[in-house]
Image: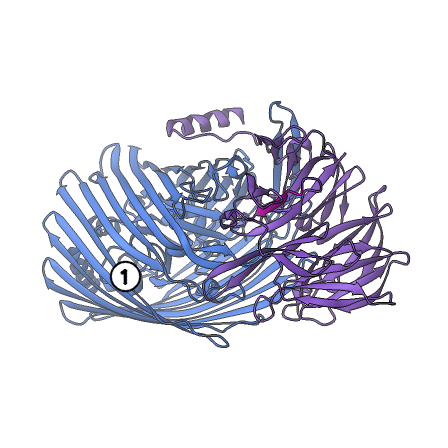
Amino acid sequence: MRFFYVFFFSLTLLTANHLSAQTMAPVDSLAPSKLELKLKEVVVRGERQEGAIPSQRLSGTELERLNSLNVADALRFFAGVQLKDYGGVGGIKTVNIRSMGTNHVGVFYDGIQLANAQNGQVDLGQFSLDNIQTISLYNGQKSEIFQSAKDFNSAGSIYMWTRRPVFEDGEHYHLKLKLRTGSFGLINPSLLVEQKLSDAVQASFSAEWVSSNGEYKFRYRRKGVMTDQIMYDTTAVRQNGDVRATRLEGALFGQFAGGKWMLKAYNYTSERGVPGAIVNNVWRRGERIWDNNSFLQGSIDKDVTERYHARLAAKYAYYLTKYVNKDTTVMMIDNVYRQKEFYLSTSHLYNVTRWWDVSVAYDVQWNEMDADMQGFVYPVRWHHFLSAATALHLGVLSVQGSVVYNHVDDRVRLAESPGARSVWTPAVFASITPLRHVGLSLRAFAKRSFRMPTFNDLYYAEIGNARLKPETVEQYNLGVAYKSKYHQQGVFTRLEMSLDGYRNFVTDKIVAYPKGAQFRWTMLNLGRVHITGVDATANLTLQPMRDFFVTARLQYTYQDAIDVTNHADTYYRDQIPYIPWHSGSAAVQLAWNGWALNYSFIYTGERYNQQENIIYNHTQPWYTHDISISKDFRLWKLRWRAQMEVNNLLAQDYDVILNYPMPQRNWRATLSVEI
Amino acid sequence: MRFGRFITCCLAALSLVACREEEVVVPTEHELIPNLSTPFGAVEGMYLLNEGNMGSNKCTLDYLDFVQGYYVRNLYAERNPTVIKELGDVGNDIQIYGSRLYVVVNCSNKIEVLDAYTARRIGQIDIPNVRYVRFHRGFAYATSYVGPVQLNNPNAVRGAVYKIDTLTMKTVAKCTVGFQPDELCVLGQYIYVANSGGYMAPHYDNTVSVIEIEGFKQIEKIPVGINLHRIKADAEGKLWVNSRGDYQTTPSRLYVLAKKTGRNEMGVTDTLDIPCSNFCISGDSLYYYSTEWNNYTQSNTITYGIINTRTKQKVSSSFITDGTERNITIPYGINIHPETRDIYVTDAKNYVSSGVLHCYSKEGRLKWSRRTGDIPAHMVFLTQ
């Protein structure tokens, strides 16, 4: 770790504007595309020291070729991740790491967390891959210690890093235009401009528009119990799944002696239909959602002395959601929800000795929510985070310890404010590399983390329960990793493998509980879940011929996630809903002379759609085969790329979520040009 | 296609995991209930409708077979395998009229018409947001929340009672009533409808609509209490109506409506100081239960009792006498066997897992319990 920081800061001083991208956004050293890039980048990435526990990571060209439209699609290639996908371009997509629940996943955009105080979930379907350079997934936490207190806080984290301008000598600007089209009436043009304003300041601007009618065919088919007779076989078109969205993003990046800064403005507006569940006699629904999400965030890093490094980060966010139900058969709804967030973070790292670093960070976040609902209590939350961490590098052993203190104070109007809540959460990470020349390392971590009840959990009319405690998770992980040397010559280029086993214990899980007469609910800290899992990954790069690269990426996840809330429940020790025992993916990319062929296979095993593991709740496995082909070429002195993708090649009819049918075979075509 | 499947299965087999199979019709399960069989009674069986959580499409039909002595779970799909997406989403009422079984499926916007003895489908009646159904002289009368209904808008469109010809299964007339009408009751020449106003919270409706059957017109609205739910007639021709209250300051209550001496109009004669979530009348006895959330203890307070409909007095504060009511999480449905007077109570548990049907003797002792579908709620007896 320390080695990395010294390396990072010294290089920042020397060639600041060349390296800002790599240091902020760690990039995979494995992708063949990277090998095609400039040699100095390869060297830099190859030498980079990983944290105590490295991330799973997808970036650059590999990411572009992976048959993924949005960040959620790409996360399917990570071990330990379960995606909830309600289908289509506009359908909500959330992820769950190691069966701990979506609310335990921290999602960070360019280093600062995307929060949603209302329901604690981030719809990853809203983040297109268009300007994403790298996606990384960390179990436990990003194992660096020079980071904000929030980075230490989640049970698992996803980091999305956008592209940052890097200019060659003599270059002053970049321009990239991209047009994507395909099934579901998809039209998706985008634009990226990067401008070198001076030796010390670069600017980038990115804009994107997505439009889709969301219409796709789906099919439900059943055969007789004992016979092979088809009882029904119906194909229909998914309705009310249309989406129109615009993303605008502008950023400034700067370097100065001993430091750097960045400033980013983001706006996302969308209108979408909510396709809803397909049930008997109902094939179309009328709910619609409008989003207008904006934020402004900035950070500044400074090496105050050779040993003391500091970072200041701030964010202001405003989220507006309008939810309207026009379906006359059910209750009419027309509500507007507004959320405001202000966030400030200071992080400090001190290199005590060559082998010992300490850090401390303090963050404060303010959230306010407003809704025009009957009986809304207008909650305001002050959340203070204080973290202290240390990292030791003792020869073959690296150890990291951190502790975060959270203090949350909510104020509500028209109702009694709940008392302030305080939580301590510790974490210990260790890795040992006994045989450095072989590339074998062992790692382990133990971490306690929690999630705060969201505003919906606490204050939603009727359902909310202001007396909720935070939901806690304890994680214990043991793993082994192998990383071969990088061979520039010969067929075998690189192999990376990892195997992790873990046990997670979720207590005080916030669950819906029946309340009073009729069909009404409240939220209680009732649930307990025990999770036993295995994540395995393997990444292989071969070079059978000159300029011909084969990259394979495999991951497998085993999850045994059982509900141990109460002996008396009929679902005691049953697998929790929507967690398959087995899941995995395989992706193979062949690259030669500007051509690239990608094949990917995604598998999700059998699972249950409700708590009881009975036949009426059983959900079949699903698996899709996706293929893409792309070609890079030069024309009129410009760099072009054309890409054609076919997803769900064998047209499997499947639901990820019960009654939310997924698309059959579909395609996308992309043309991009760079100046 | 075939080759692709082969490759897939090879890949899957390598990783010791299963392949997708063709979806099969939802199977029926049979469970023997010892000593249930009553071969000499007129009551052949009892249908139990499980509501299923909203959006799950898991409204299912169970059957208690008094002739063979079986509990038959989830029989709709096997009896009607060609019906796309099975029975539907959120059952709300079940009734027998003549030889036909009428299943009201609220979120599937329909009344499913089945043969009462075979549970085979005869047809369906499409009614948006339909709630309850009752019958009179060859016609079915069903309440519907209709729409468009606008939240908190005093000019919001009201609910309606649909009049359906049971032979043609077609709607022949509609009669507008109050807001979000729930249960209805045919008594004499009138239909009485309990209006809830559930979508208008906190401005609930508080009336019972009176429809004159002959002209099919609403002739009166009787003010009763806010958020009314069920309405049933007793042997003396009085109406018993329960209100849900607003779940906060106004508690649930049970009201009695009767004709005042020398007059034809019904009016509230008694307001019983008893919270009531659901009830069922058998002879002179009204069996009720109530579930109320207590915010202080963070738990539900559940009460059971029997009221004498003639004296309007509580005669028992529990119809379960052996202490087994402790095993009930959320009572959700109640019915009394017309011959044996056995008491059937369903437990909806947490609404998203299988419920339980409990059978108690008329003395209140648990005879047996069986697992049901999700949210078991509505029961109807089938007689020869």
Taking the image as shown, residue B359 lies to the left or right of residue A442, namely right
Which chain gets the purple colouring?
B
In this rendering, the answer to whether A378 lies above or below A169 is: below
Say if residue B310 shows up in the picture.
yes
Quadrant placement of the C terminus of chain A = bottom left
Palette colour of chain A: blue
Residue B197: image quadrant is bottom right
Foreground pick, A455 / B75: B75
- Residue A465 is situated, as x and y percent measured from the top left of the image, at 46, 64
- Residue A61 is situated, as x and y percent measured from the top left of the image, at 38, 47
Per the image, is A383 magenta? no
Say if residue A199 shows up in the picture.
no
Taking the image as shown, residue B258 lies to the left or right of residue A46, namely right
Q: What stretch of residues is rendered in magenta?
A: B341-346
Residue behind mark 1: A20
- Residue sitting at 10 percent across and 57 percent down? A355
